[in-house]
Amino acid sequence: MNALRRVARIASTDSLDRRMFLEALAYLTWARLLLLLPFHKYARFLGQPMTETAQDTEPGSRESASRVSSAIRRAGRLTPLDTRCLVRAIAAMKMLQRREVETTLYLGTAKDKDGRMIAHAWLRCGNQYVTGAEEMRGFTVVGKFARHTFQRNMRDRNGSNR
């Protein structure tokens, strides 16, 4: 299907899907530009290093994660930018952060069939993988970044469980 048909199909979807598609395009562009910087410059945007979020999810998080995953996948296919795994994971993380959904971004390495080092990134929300799940098997996790919600951070600081 060519790009014009895809745009026409997206234009015919409901307004929430259209908005999420446009938001995904914006975040994919932002993430791609962010990756032009050295890693140490943008690592602070990824979350708390070497920690993970919980495997359970807050009510509504699963649906938000599914919608974001779909929007990122559709927008990633249409954009002329290089939107491989890390770009998609960062964009999805930021979209879910806006919706106050906790995520963990994983960075992994492996060797390809020729023995060369390859890298991959994927994003998890609860027990659901939002991006990069298809390729993550076989990669060893070398980094992870937890993005907690403001509410959970406040509960943890106050010691309460409201």
Image: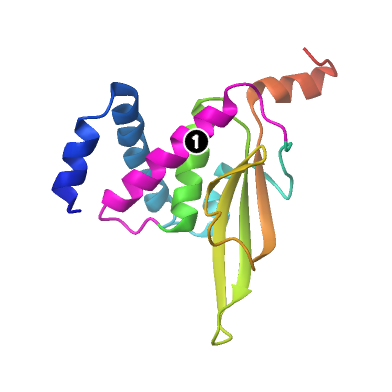
Q: Secondary structure at mark 1?
A: helix
Across and down, in percent, residue 84 comes to: 42, 58
Across and down, in percent, residue 103 comes to: 62, 38
Query: Could you say which quadrant of the image residue 120 lies in?
Result: bottom right
Return the residue nearer the eye: 62 or 51. 62
Q: Tell me the quarter of the image containing the C terminus.
A: top right
Single out the residue that lies furthest toward the top.
162
Single out the residue that lies furthest toward the left.
4
Q: Is residue 77 magenta?
A: yes
- Whether residue 53 can be seen here: yes
Query: Could you say which quadrant of the image residue 118 lies in?
Result: bottom right
Residue matched to label 1: 66
Name the colouring of the figure. rainbow
The rendered magenta stretch, by its main secondary structure, is classed as helix
Identify the magenta region. 56-83
Q: Is residue 122 magenta?
A: no
Across and down, in percent, residue 100 comes to: 57, 25
Return the residue nearer the eye: 97 or 19. 19
The residue drawn where x is 18% and y is 50% is 3
Across and down, in percent, residue 60 comes to: 57, 22
Single out the residue that lies furthest toward the right.
159
